[in-house]
Image (spheres, grey):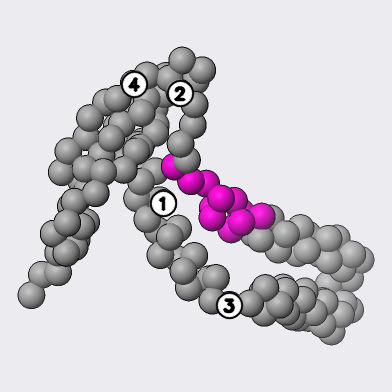
Amino acid sequence: MNKMKKVATNAVLRKESKSFDGWFKYEVTIKNEDGSKTIVPAYGKDLQDALSRVVHDDKVNRVSFVVKKVPVIVWSAIWIVTLGTITIYLRSHAEEIGDAVGLLYVATTSILAAITVSINNWFKLRNKDREL
């Protein structure tokens, strides 16, 4: 049995941005799983870009619902345990690694920080109402 999914049924171009050259504001009509319809604003360089931003917002809302249930202290503990694990692994294999152990400390910590910042930015990218 097929489950009904959200479907964009109509999109109307509302206006072109005056402050951001090449950007547009659309109003997209979305038919929800329960059959109700909602109209959401969508911003993008073209309609496909605007629709992808609406889909991104929907994904962020679904994932953030779960992520917000986990306390901040748990996320901090996960980060600290990961750093500790990396440190223990590099320390136990220091003789095999040789002189590059310091470089590996810096590299793995930088990669972990970059992953953390990327995940944080993914949650912050939203289809916000802007002055167009």
Quadrant of the image containing the C terminus: top left
Dot 1 alpha-carbon crowd within 10 angstroms: few under 14, some 14 to 19, many 20 or more: some
Q: Nearer the viewer, mark 2 or mark 1?
A: 2
Q: Residue at x 29, y 25 (%)?
A: 14
What is the three-letter code of the residue carrying label 4? Lys
**Mark 2 or 1, nearer chain start:** 1
Which residue lies under the disc numbered 3? 70
**Mark 2 or 4, nearer chain start:** 4
Across and down, in percent, residue 25 comes to 36, 28
Helix or strand or loop: what does disc 2 sit on? loop
**Mark 3 or 1, nearer chain start:** 1
Q: Measured along the vertical axis of the image, is residue 30 above or below residue 50?
A: below
**Mark 4 or 1, nearer chain start:** 4
Q: CA distance from mark 3 to mark 1?
A: 20 Å
Quadrant of the image containing the N terminus: bottom left
Which residue lies under the disc numbered 4? 15
Q: Is residue 128 visible?
A: yes
Q: Measured along the vertical axis of the image, is residue 65 above or below residue 121?
A: below
Helix or strand or loop: what does disc 3 sit on? loop
Q: Are marks 2 and 4 in contact (CB under 8 Å)?
A: yes
Residue 52, located in which quarter of the rendered image? top left
Q: Residue at x 54, y 55 (%)?
A: 123
Residue 104, located in which quarter of the rendered image? bottom right
Which residue lies under the disc numbered 1? 57
Which residue lies under the disc numbered 2? 132
Q: Judge by depth and name the residue closer to the eye, 45 or 18.
A: 18
